[in-house]
Image (cartoon, rainbow, N blue to C red):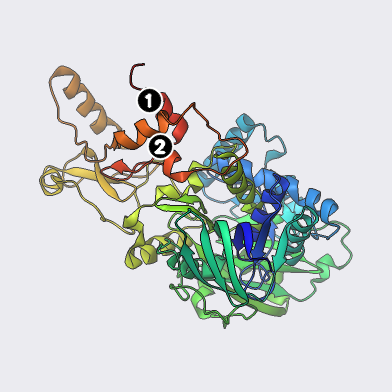
Amino acid sequence: MKANYRAVVIGGGVVGASVLYHLAKLGWRDIVLLEREVLTAGSSWHAAGGFHALNADPNIAALQAYTIDLLSEIEKESGQSVGMHMTGGVSVASAPERWEWLQSAYRVFQTMGIEDVRLVGRDEIAEACPIISTDGVLGGLYADREGYIDPSGVAHAYAKAAKLRGASVIEHNRVLDLQARPDGGWTVVTENGVIAAEHVVNAAGLWAKQVGRMAGLELPVSPMEHHYLVTEAIPELQNSKRELPLVVDLEGFTYLRQEQKGVLLGIYERNFRHWNMDGAPWDYGTELIQEDIDRISEELAFGFDRYPVLARTGIKRWVNSAFTFSPDGNPLVGPVRGLRNYWVACGVMAGFLQGGGVGKALAEWMVHGEPASDIYGMDIARYGTFASNREYIRQTTGQFYSRRFVMSYPNEQLPAGRPVKKPGAYRDMSDAGARWGCSWGLEIPLYFAPPDFEEKPTLKRSNAFDIVGEECRNLRRGTGLLDISAFSRIAQRAASQACSDAEPRWPPQGRSHRPELGRWNMVDHGILLSARMAHAMVRKPGD
């Protein structure tokens, strides 16, 4: 271990290894990954390893597509097998609204140029997966590039490919403390000595909370328990020459893939359970949590009904393990406001599906000053101090986990973690019938309705449409008031200084990003602008 590095990546799971690989791929050589035990000792080693194309956010779906393409590339580059089984996959709908949603998702994929997906009917689903019961099934969305990988193989492939490009990996060396340096770098105190680093990346997974606190940061993440089971051999699969596709039963809260001649059945239980909200114990890593079959019994029943063969098949092993969630289920990626050269890549609950895209985006941010693609849905800047409250984290992460396969609707308002911040006229507007939405922790009025009105979520026009329409007509005919508590103003001094800092240098070629110039605090509620946006909005004196 050297005394100085350009960047230290903390965490030897799939995400940390991906960040290391992408930094090396972009030309940084003096970089090191520090792992407290061995690579994958955390969430990575016991992951189910499935990958799929479907995501409600098109930008994240694109990053997932990048990850899938990358898997075969790093296998060739590293010489390490990733155990890829490109079986195809299908998301199954058995509710009319869900079937309609899958059809709309298919059209979104078409607009993105993702052409390896198609809508399928019950017969095609049964043909692809002979052990499934299609009772009640309306259809599905089939993707060719879905399947599963070997989790350990993928993480080691990233690490080996990074080392071939000049990076270092040091195992059995836990980070004990982080100390900010006056020059903007960091002193990294480890079990085996002290490192001076220009950049630090928190990719610590189950330990991201503790690594954040070393820098005075309270990350909005929490580990949660997750079950899956692996069966003994199934006679119907013994002589089959074709593997089962990855099947996601959206109304049944389960996913299934083949595991040798048996199957793996995973469950997203609605009766969720947090696990060590303050972070995993330092001596945890390759253990499992005792399964709790009673807690998941309802979802298990759905699974056994969907796949009747399970009723006569033995269970080889149970896996109940923990992995980390953010309040909205999306990763936390990017530089941290107020902490120069401190970066995060954590809360990646779908690490083997999104890890490649996360590593690419963060490495581009560190090297070039901004990611090449739109990762708004993953930017850590979406959460301010309001999200550091323990009860907020508990409610919102639990809400997301329990709704993992629950139908979500446009503009749907969910109750967890609310209200956190309220505008000054909150009580008066509530008395007047305000229906509230939430904008990054702040309650904002959406429209005003009679006391007995209840909005019903839908993929089409809401039953609030006429109410909102009447408000618009009243405003056009007369006058109105607009609550602007959620509006913010640029901190002019910081913006002007950035714009007059010599010639525009965005992205800054050949040097690291400077978060203090690129992401300014905003007066009021902490809305952040990129440097490029602010440069366009704020002119230099005399222009």
Q: Position of residue 411 (x, y in %)?
A: 37, 41
Would you say the residues marked 1 and 2 are in contact, meaning their CB atoms lie under 8 Å apart?
yes
In which quadrant is the N terminus drawn?
bottom right
Per the image, the residue denoted by label 2 is 529
Above or below 454: residue 286: below
Q: Secondary structure at mark 1?
A: helix
Mark toward the start of the polypeptide (1 vs 2): 2
Q: Residue 479 is drawn in which quadrant?
A: top left
Residue displayed at 47% across by 30% down: 532
Q: Position of residue 248 (x, y in %)?
A: 63, 56
Q: Position of residue 124 (x, y in %)?
A: 73, 46
Q: Residue 463 is drawn in which quadrant?
A: top left
Q: CA distance from mark 1 to mark 2?
A: 10 Å
Q: Position of residue 468 (x, y in %)?
A: 25, 31
Above or below 48: residue 249: above
**Disc 2: CA contacts within 10 A as few (<14), some (14-19) or many (>=20):** some
Per the image, the residue denoted by label 1 is 537
Above or below 62: residue 280: below
In which quadrant is the C terminus drawn?
top left
